Amino acid sequence: PTSPRVTTATASMDDALSDARAPTTAVVDPPLALFAQSVEHSPMFKARIVQLERDVDVEREFVARAARNCETYAESVRVASNADRAFARETLKAFEGASDMNFTSTLERLASERSRLALWIEQIMAGDLKEYVEKDLSAVKEARKKLDGRKREYEATRAKQLSAKTASDKDKADGDVIAMR
């Protein structure tokens, strides 16, 4: 036999567990919701947007400069490759009768690897950097233009609503004055 005290303790514990398992609904505090709407009008938010746009411009300049430097480096590697090939040909001419061609074949392989490196730098590094500047960073500017357009529409609608509200309040006040007479 269990005592009634143990039974009630177990029952209250089961109730507490079932309450803990019950789904809860989040209640949004109205002032908090209003705060979220007014954040976009805050000076801090606007300053942050301006700072991010400046950061995008700085990044655009940096990446464009890096792409130009990659192209310059690729051209330098290509010139070195051509110089290696020319040196290998001249060495081959100078030592025509020599049976050991390891040196010239090594120079040729080095030149071909440098050519591959130059091609890789142009296609992969410089190409991807240019694409990033042209597509991704330009997309940020386009998104800003769209945002500005939507903002102008919003401000026009907001001004229209405020003027309509002010006009209806004025009409209501005039109606109250007439009713009081």
Image: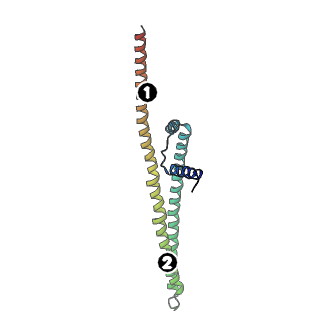
Q: Position of residue 67 (x, y in %)?
A: 50, 60
Q: Residues within 10 Å of mark 2 (few under 14, many from 20)?
A: many
Quick one: which residue is furthest to the top in this view? 181
Residue kind at label 1, given as amino acid type? Leu
Q: Looking at the rendering, in which quadrant would you find the N terminus? A: bottom right
Instruction: Find disc 1 in the rendering and name its residue.
Output: 162
Q: How many marks?
A: 2
| Residue at 49% in and 44% down | 26
Residue sticking out furthest to the front: 1
The x, y position of residue 117, in whole percent, is 50, 71
Asked if 35 appears above or below 83 in the picture, the reply is above
Identify which amino acid the numbered label 2 is placed on.
Arg
Identified at 53% across, 47% down, the residue is 52
Q: Given this view, does label 1 or label 2 mark the residue nearer the observer?
A: 1
Residue 53: image x %, image y %? 52, 46
Residue 181 percent location from the top left of the image: 42, 7
Q: Residue at x 52, y 85 (%)?
A: 94
Query: What residue is pinned by disc 2?
Result: 85
Which badge, 1 or 2, is on the more N-terminal residue? 2
